[in-house]
Image (cartoon, helix red, strand yellow):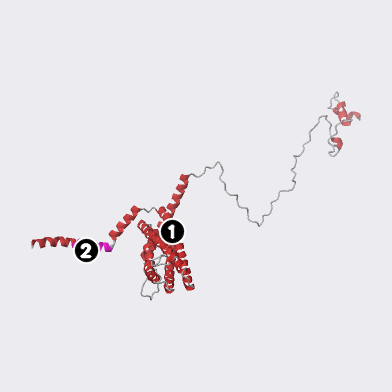
Amino acid sequence: MADFEDNPFADPGDSNPFQDPSVQQATTGNSTSKGLEEFNPFEDSNTQNTGARTTPITSPPRPADTQPAVMRPTSDAPPRPPPPYTQSAAQPAMTQAQEDLMKRQEELEKKAAELQRREQQMRSAQYNTRQNNWPPLPSWFPLQPCFYQDFSVDIPLEFQKVVKIGYYLWMAYSIVMLLNFIVSLAYFSSGGGSSAGTTFGLSILFFILFVPCSFICWYRPVYKAFRSDSSFNFFMFFFVFFIQLLVTIVQAIGIDQWGTVGFINGLSHVASGSVGKKAVGGMMLIMGFLWAVLAVVDTIFLKQVHSLYRTTGANFQKAQEEFARGVVSNPGVQTATKSAASGAISGAFTTPQQNQM
């Protein structure tokens, strides 16, 4: 039976490969390495000591603050304003030429806005006729308003404050003139003599004359000067208002028989001795103080108007041209000129005829 167990096709000289000593040593011997079936990854004995020192891979160091990044809730407090702007040394400073250019640009923008406002005013004036509203008189009064006055319509925005100050100054001047009339009456009633009578009479004349003349001769010119940038009205205001300033200074002095009460006749009346005269003299001294305050305010207002006049571009040559145009276009002057010319022509024709006869 043993003959039937042998492989008839096997090579008799061929040996079993598993009987090789090296294979048997690898499978059954004490090898330093274990097979894959016996490998346990959790055993300490699996660490192979190759004799080389290896550097372990370590994670990078973590920052001290190991808390996770979270967004802070917004608070109800308002945000902080940005720091104020400060010009650094690297930035060039604005030169004088640039500042002048900016000022001219602002002036041009103001003039453009003013021209647009006046154009709209002219368009509206075609449909709405402007009626005189000053002085404000009731409709049943026999006299009607003589002037039209509206600061918001006629006067540019940058000049409205100055014109209103001029109007209030005229009202203050009228009130002081009225008080001068009242105190002059008290001066005359307290036994001031003939000089007091003259002062009282002239105070009535000055009140009736100076109040409307001041309105027409210096307030209306300054109103029209700022309304239409009129050089002629500017010069008329300066001339008349300067004369009024000098007259106000004289009125504060209080020269007797000059129509006003002030310091001189007030002191002389206080020194008369009686109690009544001293009281009236005190009122006269107060009037002198009011005249002095009015003169100071007039000086300040005159200087303010002059400073604005220099920025408007008005001059004496323009004033002459405006005066010439006003005289030529005045209907009364035209009528007088025509009548004078016709009279001269008729006289020239009648004279030769009379000589021939």
Question: Is residue 228 part of the magenta span, yes or no?
Answer: no
Q: Position of residue 148 (x, y in %)?
A: 38, 66
Q: 16 and 98: which one is in front?
A: 98
- Label disc, if present, on residue 33 of the rendered structure: none
Mark 2 residue crowding within 10 angstroms, few (<14) / some (14–19) / many (20+):
few
The residue most toward the right is 1
- Residue type at mark 1: give it: Thr
Answer with left or right where residue 128 lies relative to residue 353: right
Q: Which residue is mark 2?
A: 339
Q: 70 and 84: which one is in front?
A: 84
Question: What kind of element bears circle 1?
Answer: helix
Q: Position of residue 208 (x, y in %)?
A: 37, 69
Range of magenta residues: 331-343
- Label 2, label 1: how far apart the Cα atoms are: 45 Å
Report whether residue 330 is seen. yes
Answer with left or right where residue 338 lies relative to residue 318: left
Predominant SS of the magenta segment:
helix
- Residue type at mark 2: give it: Ser
**Discs 2/1, front:** 1
- Label disc, if present, on residue 299 of the rendered structure: 1
